[in-house]
Image (spheres, rainbow, N blue to C red):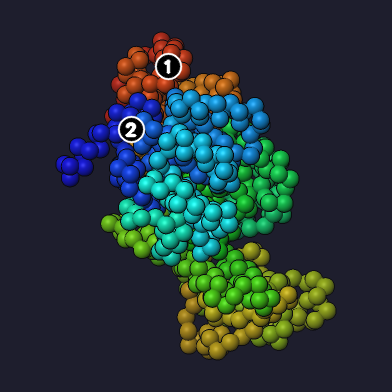
């Protein structure tokens, strides 16, 4: 593809100069070109795919201002910080700004030197603002998070509908729609609503090879969360929980363990949420334990782990939430704690909303379908990367991704659980199919509690059959039987376990049962991506540079990654440059950052070199079991 390589070079000098990147990511060049040539486009790139660069570069190439519509103030703020740090002339205009800041932004706009205007849809569509935009000669509008325009999407925003006016108001301008998740139906809606004219459609690959996916049976959310946080010490972690109470419970547990963690959910006061989000952005908090309310506004690119303490209700949600990990392209881990109980819980919620007729039947049906797909993802036996890609209609080249629990061989094999199943099922029969999971598990484990004694269930032949097994294990096995359809559970507020025809087959020995074994803790493995990105990196030096970065960021009141990303720090600690020209070769260092930070970092590097002259790198492969960062 010589032609492409040649054209790519056209935009690279600008990208290198402002951002310090050496190459463009897939589809970025095509997206940039569409705008430069004035053609409408619809760009679907996964989170972290680099959508922003696609609309940030063209105004520099054309040397004209452009407008970007964004739904969230926090997104605009973070993006502006990043742009200014690169020396890119940009402004934001939104309702969260004070009068002085707004006037200053408008004054700067009127000078004609500004190249990018980040604005909310409401603000953009105000009459006077539209006139100003017209006068400035803006010829390009990019709509970020464009799925918000469709009520088929997962985040419909009515104010986005009004953007349709842009087409008439600015005839001849190019319109661009950007989003990370869009089913064909949502894409069609975007095209129609925005009246895109023969748009260039660029649909990226959904696989994120730098993410390591793990699905682990849930034993104790607290303990398992702490284990994961421990392996990511000093690194950003987002943990999702199903309920508000759960987020608070887990966050305060982590705090008691000395982890800088905060809860985040829609029930907290707005200021508190904003404060938490900002502190997370500035790396003052390590872990945010959140409901799905958290994340849309998170631009932090160095999130090293996204953990789900329960199964989400759709793959779209999962993809979006895990998409917040490793946006800088470096290794990151996504851990999902799974229990069959999660499925029952979601099913219960879907049934409830069906009963209360909160949603029309097709929507209920769709939720069931989405849930079934999510559950399929959680079952072992197939590469997680492959499953996710297939869900979005794409296939992977290799069957062995090397970056999921299945391919790394971490998944426990299913074991023959026929005998256990028979014990459980006969206990359900013995208690007369009139009790719920807790009671049945109690009888099996031989508990002599009030309810069991009152029912005289301590006299049953199944009493204490699974005496030596922990409660969590037996409960989980019961859930597995329900999940496999080998045991039924009634609906309603007090669900009761009942036998069904399949249960009878199991009891008669006509059907074998496979169960997931109780978890045996294994050593977690490392992916090739991770080993590679740390190869040759001097860890002590990395830590020193990281400290320097934190200090500089605090001085300037910006998040650390705005100074330099992790990838830049690792390269610095690998290459150990000693001059300004060498610095420019490093990923993420453009002219502005060289001017701002070059000398300070060179000084630190020189100090380190004086104390520790460069030794030749050790031969052989890097230590695969070394911790992700020296501690
Ligand atoms: P998206 O909006 O698609 O989720 P972003 O635009 O925020 O993704 O980009 C994600 C990260 O990738 C950012 O840290 C950005 O600086 C980086 N990035 C974008 N394009 C490139 C590139 N061509 N080379 C290296 N890094 C890039
Ligand atoms: Zn795999």
Quick check: 101 left or right of 34?
Answer: right
Q: Position of residue 233 (x, y in %)?
A: 55, 37
Q: Earlier in the sequence, mark 1 or mark 2?
A: 2
Q: Residues within 10 Å of mark 1 (few under 14, many from 20)?
A: few
Q: Residues within 10 Å of mark 2 (few under 14, many from 20)?
A: some
Q: Secondary structure at mark 1?
A: helix
Q: Along the line of sight, which residue is nearer the eye, 127 or 311?
A: 127
Residue 96, quarter of the rendered image: top right
Residue drawn where x is 48% and y is 30% of the image: 90
Disc number for residue 293: none
Residue 254 visible within the image: yes
- Name the residue beneath numbered marker 1: 595
Q: What is the tally of numbered marks visible in this picture?
A: 2
Front tag of 1 and 2: 2
Residue drawn where x is 45% and y is 55% of the image: 194
Q: Along the line of sight, which residue is nearer the eye, 600 or 353?
A: 353
Q: Along the line of sight, which residue is nearer the eye, 607 or 106?
A: 106
- Name the residue beneath numbered marker 2: 61
User: In 3D space, how far apart are the residues under numbered discs 1 and 2 (Cα atoms)?
Assistant: 22 Å
- Say if 369 sits above or below 194 in the image: below
Residue 323 visible within the image: no
**Image quadrant in which the N terminus is located:** top left
């Amino acid at each position: 593809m010589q032609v492409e390589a040649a054209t790519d070079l056209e935009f690279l000098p600008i990208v290198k100069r402002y951002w310090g990147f050496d190459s463009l990511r897939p589809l970025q060049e095509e997206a940039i070109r569409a705008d430069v040539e004035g053609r409408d486009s619809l760009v679907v790139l996964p989170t972290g795919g680099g959508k922003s660069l696609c609309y940030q570069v063209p105004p520099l190439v054309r040397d004209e201002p452009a407008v970007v519509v964004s739904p969230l103030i926090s997104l605009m703020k973070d993006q502006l910080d990043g742009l200014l740090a690169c020396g890119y002339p940009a402004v934001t205009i939104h309702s969260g700004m004070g009068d002085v800041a707004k006037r200053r932004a408008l004054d700067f706009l009127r000078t004609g030197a500004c190249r990018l205007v980040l604005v909310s849809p409401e603000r953009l569509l105000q009459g006077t603002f539209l006139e100003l935009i017209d006068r400035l000669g803006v010829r390009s509008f990019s709509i970020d998070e464009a799925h918000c325009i469709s009520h088929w999407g997962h985040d419909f925003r009515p104010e986005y509908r009004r953007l349709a006016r842009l087409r008439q108001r600015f005839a001849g301008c190019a319109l661009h729609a950007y989003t990370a998740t869009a089913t064909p139906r949502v894409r069609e809606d975007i095209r129609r609503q925005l009246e895109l004219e023969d748009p260039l459609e660029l649909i990226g690959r959904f696989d994120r090879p730098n993410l390591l996916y793990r699905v682990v049976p849930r034993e104790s959310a607290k303990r398992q969360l702490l284990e994961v946080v421990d392996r990511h010490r000093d690194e950003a972690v987002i943990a999702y929980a199903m309920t508000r109470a759960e987020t608070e419970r887990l966050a305060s547990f982590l705090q008691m363990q000395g982890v800088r963690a905060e809860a985040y959910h829609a029930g907290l006061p707005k200021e508190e949420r904003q404060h938490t989000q900002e502190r997370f952005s500035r790396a003052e908090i390590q872990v945010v334990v959140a409901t799905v309310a958290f994340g849309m506004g998170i631009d932090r690119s160095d999130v090293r782990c996204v953990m789900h303490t329960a199964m989400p209700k759709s793959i779209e949600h999962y993809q979006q939430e895990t998409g917040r990990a490793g946006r800088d392209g470096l290794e990151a881990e996504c851990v999902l704690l799974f229990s069959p109980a999660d499925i029952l819980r979601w099913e219960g919620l879907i049934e409830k909303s069906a009963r209360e007729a909160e949603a029309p039947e097709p929507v209920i049906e769709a939720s069931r379908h989405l849930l079934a797909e999510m559950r399929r993802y959680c079952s072992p036996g197939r590469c997680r990367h492959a499953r996710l890609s297939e869900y979005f209609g794409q296939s992977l080249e290799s069957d062995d991704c090397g970056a999921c629990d299945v391919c790394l061989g971490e998944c426990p094999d299913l074991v023959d659980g026929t005998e256990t199943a028979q014990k459980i099922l006969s206990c359900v029969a013995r208690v007369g199919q009139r009790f719920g999971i807790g009671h049945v598990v109690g009888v099996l484990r031989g508990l002599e509690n009030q309810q069991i004694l009152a029912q005289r269930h301590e006299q049953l032949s199944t009493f204490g059959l699974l005496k030596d097994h922990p409660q969590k294990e037996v409960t989980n096995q019961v859930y597995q039987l329900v999940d496999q359809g080998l045991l039924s559970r009634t609906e309603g507020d007090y669900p009761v376990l009942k036998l069904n025809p399949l249960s009878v087959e199991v009891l008669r020995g006509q059907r074998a049962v496979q169960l997931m074994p109780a978890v045996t803790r294994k050593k977690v493995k490392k992916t090739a991506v991770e080993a590679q990105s740390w190869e040759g990196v001097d860890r002590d030096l990395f830590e020193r540079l990281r400290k320097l970065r934190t200090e500089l960021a605090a001085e300037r009141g910006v998040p650390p990654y705005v100074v330099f990303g992790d990838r830049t720090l690792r390269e610095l600690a690998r290459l150990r440059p000693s001059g300004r020209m060498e610095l420019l070769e490093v990923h993420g260092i453009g002219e502005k950052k060289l001017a701002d930070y070059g000398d300070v970092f060179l000084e630190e590097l020189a100090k380190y070199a004086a104390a520790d002259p460069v030794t030749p790198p050790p031969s052989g492969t890097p230590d695969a079991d070394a911790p992700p960062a020296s501690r």
